[in-house]
Amino acid sequence: EDQVTQSPEALRLQEGESSSLNCSYTVSGLRGLFWYRQDPGKGPEFLFTLYSAGEEKEKERLKATLTKKESFLHITAPKPEDSATYLCAVQALNKGAQKLVFGQGTRLTINP
Amino acid sequence: DGGITQSPKYLFRKEGQNVTLSCEQNLNHDAMYWYRQDPGQGLRLIYYSQIVNDFQKGDIAEGYSVSREKKESFPLTVTSAQKNPTAFYLCASSSQKQETQYFGPGTRLLVL
């Protein structure tokens, strides 16, 4: 069974304090790994897609990396507006219709 | 302005009542999805549709029904058989060529 586990569940940082969020996954064959940002009471906002081990993608203060067993979302010098829940999801090669399996999310709070 | 709209933002259901959540997209996407989000849990797939007039059950379809009569629309009905309907419901869509799913703003369903 495909599974995604995110850690930590919650993380509090001071503004400017860099850190990383973890997404561990087990899947029969990875088609893609997705990162989303979700603000309270809103729908998830797409951030990145990663397809193969060693791939990296960046957007402003965020950088996502991928290995064969996990992905990291690195946040460099975060600002209060980076506070949100970050969701990780995987799509397996053998599953049709682009089905995604989601982790439970990491709730990130950046204090000014 | 392309995107996904969901209505209403909040919905109240009485005991024994069926309610319908609306999802419309103008992205010309072929595939559409319904997810349920509960506190502390990852998004779980209810139903999905790859083309008009065709849809499949996801992981938690019991107590729900859908239709796909138009490419732009994928309404979800929460029936009286769903005993624990209180949740945040999210609609998503994707194109056949790209795996990324884009989400709407969500509908919060509450039971009176």
Image (spheres, grey):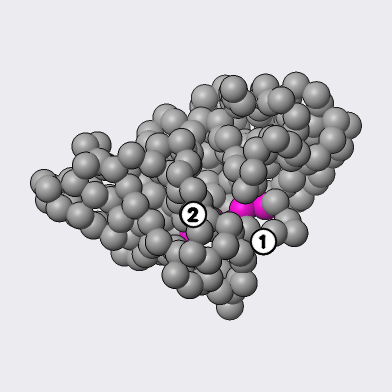
Indicate the position of residue B101 as horizontal and vertical percent values.
Answer: 61, 53
Residue A65 makes an appearance in the image = yes
Q: Is residue B104 above or below residue A62?
A: below
Tag count:
2
Indicate the position of residue B54 as horizontal and vertical percent values.
Answer: 50, 59
Q: In the rendered image, which residue does mark 1 sit on?
A: B95
Q: In the rendered image, which residue does mark 2 sit on?
A: B55
Residue A79 makes an appearance in the image = no
Q: Quadrant of the C terminus of chain A?
A: top right
Q: Is residue B13 left or right of residue A82?
A: left
**Residue shown at the point (36%, 46%) measured from the top left:** B88
**Residue shown at the point (67%, 22%) measured from the top left:** A26
Residue bounds of the magenta highlight: B100-104
Is A44 or A68 nearer to us in this picture? Answer: A68
Q: Decide whether residue B50 is among the magenta residues.
A: no
Indicate the position of residue B95 as horizontal and vertical percent values.
Answer: 67, 61
Is A96 or A63 nearer to us in this picture? Answer: A96
Q: Is residue B33 above or below residue A19?
A: below
Asked where in the image residue A78 lies, by quadrant, the reply is top right
Chain holding disc 2: B
Indicate the position of residue A70 as horizontal and vertical percent values.
Answer: 73, 24
The local secondary structure at tag 2 comes to strand
Chain holding disc 1: B
Circle 1 crowding by C-alpha within 10 Å: few under 14, some 14–19, many from 20: some
Is B68 or A101 nearer to us in this picture? Answer: B68
**Residue shown at the point (33%, 39%) measured from the top left:** B62
Amino acid at pointer 1:
Ser
Real-space Cα distance between discs 2 and 1?
15 Å
Instruction: Farthest residue to the right: give it.
Output: A54
Amino acid at pointer 2:
Phe
